């Protein structure tokens, strides 16, 4: 890699993150550090899913994964026929843009830090980065999670050990080995594992300490409310949870954890038991939201019984 061009590229990418309440450069840095921890300490390297090239793909994917984010979701871009939706035929317009805009920069002489890398390696990096960043579109969430469960032969249950901390699973290892004990990971499996790792890192704030996590959810709520404001201005129906006159996502976190977050982190920790501390941290935030939901429900019932 060309160090000088790499630094210029990283600074240009950082500059290209707008000051959205949630999808900003701090989110990108947060995802990068979460992915680093997951890959290095969560067991991906240890189980042979991540070599030097894939690690580079992971870092670059996290860094660019929300580049030039518009602060609105794909549905909004599609509904207003935004140029990106037209360009990408309504298919993951935001994620396609994060990738295409970043690769365009990478290909220009000024930022081409990979210009001396052998073609084959560069092609592998590009393929892995594209697969990982496209997988961050939440529209693909359930399909990717199901494929991960099938490929890793998971049964969808919590790792044994009560609260999921430290217990040894009774089932056989999901990591394929041949009869002579060598790893036999195929490219599809490696790709899926890397995609799910980035998806977990993208939701990494769910495993942050309570105060930090709560802030991120408030930032996301504010970004959603701003989208709701724009929908009102454009005479569009306001998307669910985006109307600032009504309840936002801070009032529906238990559902998000139940349906999206917990199954994902549980599967990941089942496949990679070294990542169990991350699952435990997510469970702690889940407990916080349940406590808040109970307080909120009590206050509501007290109000309605007056
Ligand atoms: P990304 O846009 O790449 O950051 O993908 C993650 C998506 O997950 C965000 O855009 C949100 O739509 C969604 N998300 C993340 N955290 C939460 C949360 N706590 N509650 C609801 N949705 C969330
Ligand atoms: Zn993100």
Image: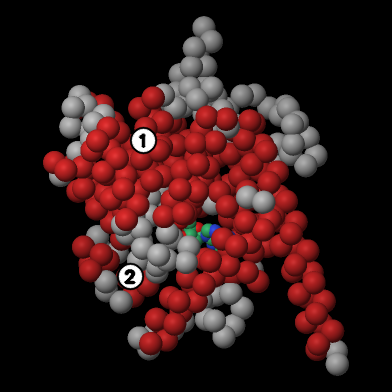
Residue at 67% x, 38% y is 277
**Residue 244 percent coordinates (x, y):** 54, 81
Q: Is mark 1 within 8 Å of ligand 2?
A: no
Q: Is residue 232 above or below residue 115?
A: below
**Residue 139 percent coordinates (x, y):** 44, 58
Q: Which mark is residue 77?
A: 2
Q: Is residue 135 above or below residue 162?
A: below
**Residue 24 percent coordinates (x, y):** 42, 59
Check the picture and name the quadrant holding the C terminus: bottom right
Visible in this render: residue 16?
yes
Element type where label 1 sits in the image: helix
**Which image quadrant is residue 233 in?**
bottom left
**Which image quadrant is residue 94 in?**
bottom left
Residue at 58% x, 74% y is 248
- Residue lying at the far left in this picture: please name it: 109
- Left or right, 160 with respect to 243, comes to right
Estimate how packed mark 1 is, as few (under 14), some (14 to 19) or many (20 or more) residues with alpha carbons within 10 Å: many
Q: CA distance from mark 1 to mark 2?
A: 28 Å
Residue at 59% x, 83% y is 246
Visible in this render: residue 196?
no
Check the picture and name the quadrant holding the N terminus: top left
- Left or right, 91 with respect to 301, comes to left
Q: Which mark is residue 284?
A: none
Tell which of 211 and 7 is nearer to you. Answer: 7
Q: How many marks?
A: 2
**Residue 177 percent coordinates (x, y):** 52, 17
Element type where label 2 sits in the image: helix
- Residue lying at the far top in this picture: please name it: 180
Question: What residue did someone put label 1 on?
Answer: 57
């Amino acid at each position: 890699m060309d160090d000088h061009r790499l630094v210029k590229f990283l600074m240009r990418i950082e500059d290209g993150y707008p000051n959205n309440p949630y999808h900003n450069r701090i989110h990108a840095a947060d995802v990068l550090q979460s992915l680093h921890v997951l890959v290095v300490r969560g067991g991906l390297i240890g189980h042979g899913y991540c070599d030097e090239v894939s690690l580079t793909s992971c870092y670059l994917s996290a860094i660019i994964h929300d580049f030039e984010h518009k602060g609105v979701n794909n549905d909004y871009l599609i509904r207003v026929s935004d140029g990106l939706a037209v360009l990408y035929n309504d298919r993951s317009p935001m994620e396609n843009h994060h990738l295409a805009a970043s690769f365009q920069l990478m290909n220009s002489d000024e930022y081409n830090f990979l210009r001396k890398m052998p073609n084959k390696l560069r092609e592998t990096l590009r393929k892995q980065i594209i697969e990982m960043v496209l997988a961050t579109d939440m529209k693909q969430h359930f399909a990717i999670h199901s494929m991960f469960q099938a490929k890793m032969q998971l049964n969808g249950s919590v790792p044994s050990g009560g609260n999921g901390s430290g217990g040894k699973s009774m089932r056989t290892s999901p990591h394929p080995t041949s009869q002579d004990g060598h790893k036999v990971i195929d490219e599809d499996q490696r790709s899926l594992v890397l995609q799910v790792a980035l998806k977990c890192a993208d939701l990494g704030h769910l495993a942050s300490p309570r105060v930090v996590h709560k802030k991120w959810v408030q930032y996301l709520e504010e970004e959603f409310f701003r989208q709701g404001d724009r929908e009102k201005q454009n005479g569009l129906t306001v998307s669910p949870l985006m109307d600032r006159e009504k309840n936002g996502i801070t009032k529906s976190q238990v559902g998000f954890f139940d349906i999206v977050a917990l199954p994902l982190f549980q599967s990941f920790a089942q496949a990679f038991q070294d990542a169990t501390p991350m699952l435990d941290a997510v469970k702690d935030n889940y407990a916080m939201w349940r406590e808040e939901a109970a307080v909120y429900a009590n206050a509501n019932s007290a109000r309605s019984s007056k």
